[in-house]
Image (spheres, helix red, strand yellow):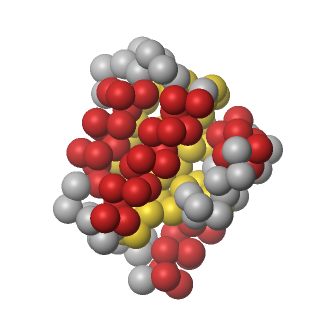
Amino acid sequence: MSDPLVDIDVSTLPSGAAHVAVAGEIDMANAEAVERRLDEALHGLATAVIDLGSVEYIDSRGVRMLCDLADRARWHDVLVAVAAPPDGVAGEVLAVAGLTEALSVHPSADAAERALLSRG
């Protein structure tokens, strides 16, 4: 992605689920572009882990974007789990917002992948 504030990398986990790693900042200036890139990454998938472990900043627009993304994923029958360490920026913000359960937030990508396998 060509946004200087955020980097998105898509790879495949051992289970076959997509691993969508987001690093940098998600805010009102780039949330729409990040959302488009994440939508593209999730298109046609059955399972995905969105890894926010390297997110250094996320504002309310970024949180809203994650909620909207999760809603669309459910609508398209894509199982999504979020990896956000509880001591990291995204983990703390999502916990304060009360969204850890609604967004299926887990402390690591491995834990999120295991949660997906148990749900699938």
Q: Residue at x 42, y 47 (%)?
A: 68
Give percent across and percent down for residue 101.
Answer: 65, 64
**Residue in view at x 34 percent, y 43 percent:** 38
Most extreme residue toward the left is: 44
Say which of 38 and 18 sits in front.
38
In this rendered view, identify the residue nearer to me: 56 or 35.
Answer: 35
Asked if residue 17 can be seen in this view, the reply is no
Residue under the image location 42 percent in, 83 percent down: 120
Left or right: where 49 falls relative to 74: right
Q: In the figure, 114 relative to 69: above or below?
A: below
Where residue 73 appears, as percent x and y from the top left, is 35, 60
Which quarter of the figure has residue 31? top left
* Res. 89 image quadrant: top right
Judge left or right: residue 37 versus residue 63.
Answer: left
Q: In percent of the image, x 41 and y 21: which residue is there?
A: 30
Does 83 sit above or below residue 58?
below
Q: Is residue 15 above or below residue 49?
A: below
Horizontal arrangement in the rendering, residue 14 relative to residue 45 (left or right): right
Question: Is any atom of residue 69 visible in this view?
Answer: yes
> Where is residue 13, by image quadrant?
bottom left
Q: Position of residue 79 (x, y in %)?
A: 40, 69
Residue 59 is situated, as x and y percent measured from the top left of the image, at: 60, 27
Quarter placement of the N terminus: top left
- Along the viewing direction, whichever of 53 and 40 lies nearer the viewer: 40
Look at the picture and state if 50 lies above or below 74.
above
Q: How many marks?
A: 0
